Image (cartoon, helix red, strand yellow):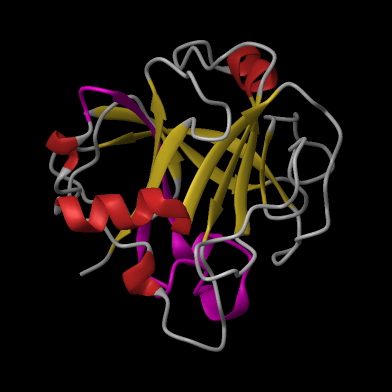
Amino acid sequence: MRQVYQLLCASADDNDSGIKFGGGAFIEKDWPKNPLGEDLTLLITIDSDKLNNEINRFKLPKGRYISVFSTYNENRYFLDDIIFFGDDIELNYIKSGFTKVTVSNSSKLNESGNTFPCQRIKLNEKQINDEDYPAFSFLSNEIPNGMVGYDKIIKDYDFICQLYSADIPSKDGGALGLSDAIGYLFLKKNIDDVDNAGLFFVQSA
């Protein structure tokens, strides 16, 4: 069995986990763009201190806000811009700016590039079988079943969470290109660049 923390919609009465889908980002610079000149879309933000207080196993950088951005465009097919299955060309393409993971110590909210509405998240501790392929968003220290190609990055990055496209508040659940697409968030083991603090990519059947 594996223990994960499922990301669920929070109500006003739920504790603040420090995690939210959509809304504004805690960034100090201008809203990021991809190499095509398109504004990236904010998928999720994490208040490290709040999450560390609720769950201390992830040891996220203290006093920081993590923001995860990805390419999204309702008017064109964009899945190929964010896909990675272990190929170096795919990895370098994504790293060129089609997704972005930043950390900031600023609590000032930048809402200039909002695409998806803000949705507060609560955490639900959940046990899954070792052989399961979970189709939902969750935090975990363990690489989930179904992910491929991670051997290319695991030396320099720690896995943080899985995002299921249909969970993100977007049109037809297609935040990641397809409603059943899965995104994976990794943080650098040693964050030396706050504007390049991790890696986010998508895989789909």
Q: Is residue 121 above or below residue 159?
A: below
Image quarter of residue 18 = top right
Q: Is residue 204 left or right of residue 198?
A: left
Query: Image quadrant for the C terminus?
Result: bottom left
Whether residue 183 is visible, yes or no, is no
Q: Is residue 40 left or right of residue 2?
A: right
Q: How many marks?
A: 0
Residue 134 horizontal/vertical position (percent): 30, 50
Q: Looking at this view, name the residue that lies furthest to the bottom.
A: 75
The residue lying at 40 percent from left, 52 percent from top is: 96
The residue lying at 61 percent from left, 79 percent from top is: 171
Residue 181 horizontal/vertical position (percent): 35, 66
Whether residue 61 is visible, yes or no, is yes
Residue placed most toward the observer, 124 or 24: 24
Q: Is residue 54 left or right of residue 156?
A: right
Residue 95 horizontal/vertical position (percent): 38, 48
The segment highlighted magenta reads 154-183
Residue 103 horizontal/vertical position (percent): 61, 29
Residue placed most toward the observer, 145 or 94: 94
The residue lying at 56 percent from left, 78 percent from top is: 73
Q: Is residue 186 left or right of residue 152?
A: right
Q: Is residue 200 above or below residue 52?
A: below
Query: Image quadrant for the N terminus?
Result: top left
